[in-house]
Amino acid sequence: MTKIEDIATHAREIAGQLGIKKFDIYGATVDESSVQVDGGEPKQVKASNRSSVTVRVWNEEQTMGVTSTTDVDPKGLEMALKTAYEASFFGVKENVPDFSPEADAPLAADIPSEKAPQVPVAKLLETLIGAEKELLSAHPAIKGVPYNGLSQRDIDRFYLNSGSALRNESRSYASLYLYTKTEEEGKKPRSAGAFRISRSLDLLDLQGCLKEAADKTISHLNYQKVKSGKYTVVFSPEAFLSLLGAFSNIFNAQNILDKQSLSTPESLGAPIASPLLSVCDDALHPANVGAETFDGEGTPTRRVSLIEEGVLTGFLHSAGTAKRLNAQPTGHGNMGAKVTVGSHFYHVFPGKPAEKECSLASADNVIFIDDLQALHAGVKALQGSFSLPFDGWMVSNGKLTSIDSATVAGDFLEVLKSIVFVEQEAELTPGGVCPRIWVEGLSITGE
């Protein structure tokens, strides 16, 4: 990427020539290579270099125009600034976006901004072909790994404005995904998957991913039907975070202002979950490989408490939502044609101590849900309800038996209030860090 200082210098010079006094620019570039394999042969090899730059300009009437470009050389910047300036005269008159008041504030953390050397694509293929081969040999029933992928990615981000704000950072990470399929005579195909992410290919937990995918797949081979009824359900970390993400409008200030949320501005301070549960959004969590130190508006990211011992304690804000709700920006603004609000990295942990400890090793008549499916279709985010098929096990006296097929249904706010235990040991997932969560009285419908 062109040096951020050069972009800033060119942008300010061009803005001065055009008579533009107020503007800001957010940009990111992603350099990525990824591979997929099938039966020991390359299935797909991709390499891409993607750039996106968003330019906002305010005119003398303080209305704003926005445009996007992929070109940050002087000619591209000049065209973008001109276009955004012309668009500004058609901008909204109410709740006009503005600079974040923290766009030039010190960053909350000094995370080293460094990239790992990318390995040759041939090395990616060799690694993934070896992983596929090892997984196929783990059990005779495993006949294929239809979904797999190994990728490495470099990301550069920057933000600058016509004031004094000037930020940039760089990151690298590698990720691996393996998803199996079985074939056994007289039985349904069974599948399971595992995912790992790290700062480089060398640090990727390849063996851990292989073992998890194989163990889960083998555990699903001998499956049984489950009776419909109410059960105590244990959500895996990934399953609980996928459900939390599906109902993230609870914490999203933009959704709240748009009246597209299960919360209102007055919900702060109200108990919405069991006191056993606490939740933060923490972009700077040490386990977050893709940590971002600032958002699309240049606001420093930070740890934001959302639920503390069952009480709703915070919302996720952009600069605009914070101003309208008389709050502080939290570093969750995403720059685009309009500024949206989104989470970074959830951290779920125990709140108050539970009255009794729970353990899968001794549990009886409990459903352990590993993976929720069809979230795009089975979630009614504005009603709070869900009905989702899942992969999981029936737990009887500590023994796990795979469930043939079933769905779990409920109301998410009721799920939060029905939590009876939050385990201590947390696991890293793509969406955050979370332990297993025990919920009583959920409806399970068997086949």
Image: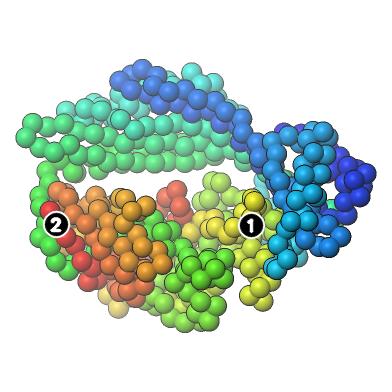
**Crowding near pointer 1: few (<14 within 10 Å), some, many (20+)?**
some
Q: Residue at x 83, y 63 (%)?
A: 61
Residue underneath mark 2? 446
Under mark 2, the amino acid is Gly
Q: Is residue 249 visible?
A: yes
Under mark 1, the amino acid is Val
Q: Residue at x 16, y 60 (%)?
A: 445
SS class of the residue under badge 1? loop
Residue underneath mark 1? 339
The reply to whether callout 1 and callout 2 are in contact (CB within 8 Å) is: no
Please provide percent x and percent y for residue 325.
Answer: 63, 75
Answer with left or right where residue 104 lies relative to residue 266: right
Answer with left or right where residue 81 lies relative to residue 181: right
SS class of the residue under badge 2? strand
Please provide percent x and percent y for residue 169.
Answer: 69, 44
Please provide percent x and percent y for residue 281.
Answer: 53, 62
Determine which quarter of the picture holds residue 74: top right
Residue lying farthest front?
Answer: 90
Q: Is residue 292 above or below residue 96?
A: above
Give the distance between the C-alpha atoms of the residues marked 1 and 2, in whole angstroms.
43 Å
Determine which quarter of the picture holds residue 257: bottom right
Q: Is residue 170 visible?
A: no
